[in-house]
Amino acid sequence: MTPTLVRHHTYADSSAPVDPGTRARDWAAIQERVLAPLHEAVFDRLEVGAGTRMLSLGCGSGLALLAAASRGARVTGVDTDRERLALARERLGSAGRAEDSGTWAEGSGGRARDTEPA
């Protein structure tokens, strides 16, 4: 599992507004600690690799996509939350996988608008 740090924010006022991007990153860090071992075990069992294509509806911060792409899979992520979708795109890019392995779409309800490949 990749070690991550959860940022601890100190606010004088507990009702202070929080940047949605910061909130998405914090949630991703918590989620990664819990779900990364599960994704790895499932992807081992399913033999996810270079011949795999993965569609993640509600991809969130892209943890499952990152795990699949790191094994050589081509991934597509769809999410209604712009902040989490941006984080997924960024995470895949920083892992050196965005140039040839990711496609992203933002959707709400029943239709998704295609975006440029990540």
Image (cartoon, rainbow, N blue to C red):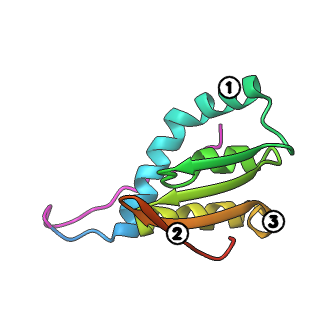
- Check disc 3 and report its element: helix, strand or loop: helix
Count of number-bearing discs: 3
Hey, which quadrant is residue 96 in on the image? bottom right
- Residues shaded magenta: 1-15
**Residue at screen point 61% across, 44% down:** 64
Task: Determine if residue 4 is in view.
Answer: no
- Check disc 2 and report its element: helix, strand or loop: helix
Residue 85 is one of the magenta-drawn residues: no
The amino acid type of the residue labelled 2 equals Ala
Residue at numbered disc 1: 41
Marks 1 & 3, CB-CB < 8 Å contact: no
Q: Of marks 1 and 3, which one's residue comes earlier in the chain?
A: 1
Residue 10 is one of the magenta-drawn residues: yes
Q: Of marks 2 and 1, which one's residue comes earlier in the chain?
A: 1
70 vs 29, nearest the viewer:
70
* Mark 2 closeness class: few <14, some 14–19, many ≥20 residues within 10 Å: some
Q: Is residue 37 above or below residue 59?
A: above
Residue 73 x, y percent position in the rendering: 78, 48
The amino acid type of the residue labelled 1 equals Ala
Marks 2 & 1, CB-CB < 8 Å contact: no
Dominant secondary structure, magenta: loop
Label 2 – label 3 distance at C-alpha: 17 Å
Residue at numbered disc 3: 100
Q: Of marks 2 and 3, which one's residue comes earlier in the chain?
A: 2
Is 1 on the left-hand or right-hand side of 88?
right
The amino acid type of the residue labelled 3 equals Asp
**Residue at screen point 21% across, 71% down:** 17
Residue at numbered disc 2: 86
**Residue at screen point 74% across, 27% down:** 46
